[in-house]
Image (spheres, grey):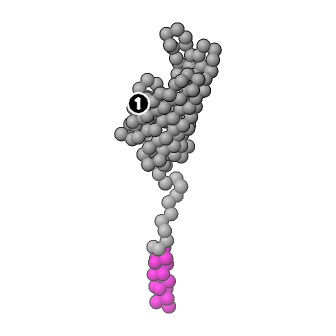
Amino acid sequence: MKNVILALALLAVIMHGCKKDEIQESEKPEIDVRDQFIGKWDVTQTLNITEFGLNDTHIKDYLIRKDNSDKRRILIWDGAREITAVVDGNTFSCKYSISLWDGTNSGTEEITSQGEIRDNKISEIGTVQINMCGKSNVGTYSSVCTRK
């Protein structure tokens, strides 16, 4: 009888030792999907508005950081302004407006875009709308960002 009890105790220890460790949900580290966007980026932007005969390419630097007030947002510093974007997994979306002045007339440039990060490269596409002199002209916007 003593051997049976000892065998059962040994079996219980072996079975318990083979059981996978279960991590409680509260013990799992929180993954912040914004981390993949954070850092310094070399950026090539292209704006194309046919009505203006505009097809410009600009080379810029971006500095992207987390927005501490909202766990879904990142802040993109483009050297002139800070742009807020909303992150969803490996994609983001943003909409912002820039004031324009050509020396005589004032207006706005509005950009709406969506981007995706893949293999340390961000690709972004969207629309650009120039509102000036009572006219509105729409074109395309794109950028490619490569991590520095």
- For the point 50% across and 63% down, which residue is it? 22
Q: Position of residue 103 (x, y in %)?
A: 49, 10
Q: Which is the main secondary structure of the residues drawn in magenta?
A: helix
Query: Which residue is the extreme one toward the top?
Result: 104
- Examine the image and state in which quarter residue 37 appears: top left
- Tell whether 139 sits left or right of 123: right
Q: Secondary structure at mark 1?
A: strand
Q: Amino acid at mark 1?
A: Lys
| Image position of 136 with respect to 36: above or below | above
- For the point 56% across and 16% down, which residue is it? 107
- Tell whether 15 sits left or right of 138: left
- For the point 41% across and 31% down, which residue is it? 59
Q: Dot 1 corresponds to which residue? A: 60
Q: Camera-side residue: 38 or 141?
A: 141
Asked if residue 147 lies in the magenta stretch, the reply is no
| Image position of 5 with respect to 119: above or below | below
Q: Position of residue 53 (x, y in %)?
A: 54, 24
- Examine the image and state in which quarter residue 140 appears: top right
Q: Would you call the spot at circle 1 few (<14 residues within 10 Å), some (14-19), or many (20 or more)?
A: few
| Image position of 110 with respect to 87: above or below | above
Q: Camera-side residue: 11 or 41?
A: 41
For the question of whether residue 73 can be seen, the reply is no
Asked if residue 5 lies in the magenta stretch, the reply is yes
- For the point 46% across and 85% down, which residue is it? 6
Q: Camera-side residue: 80 or 131?
A: 131
Q: Position of residue 101 (x, y in %)?
A: 51, 14
Q: Find the magenta span and give its range.
A: 1-16
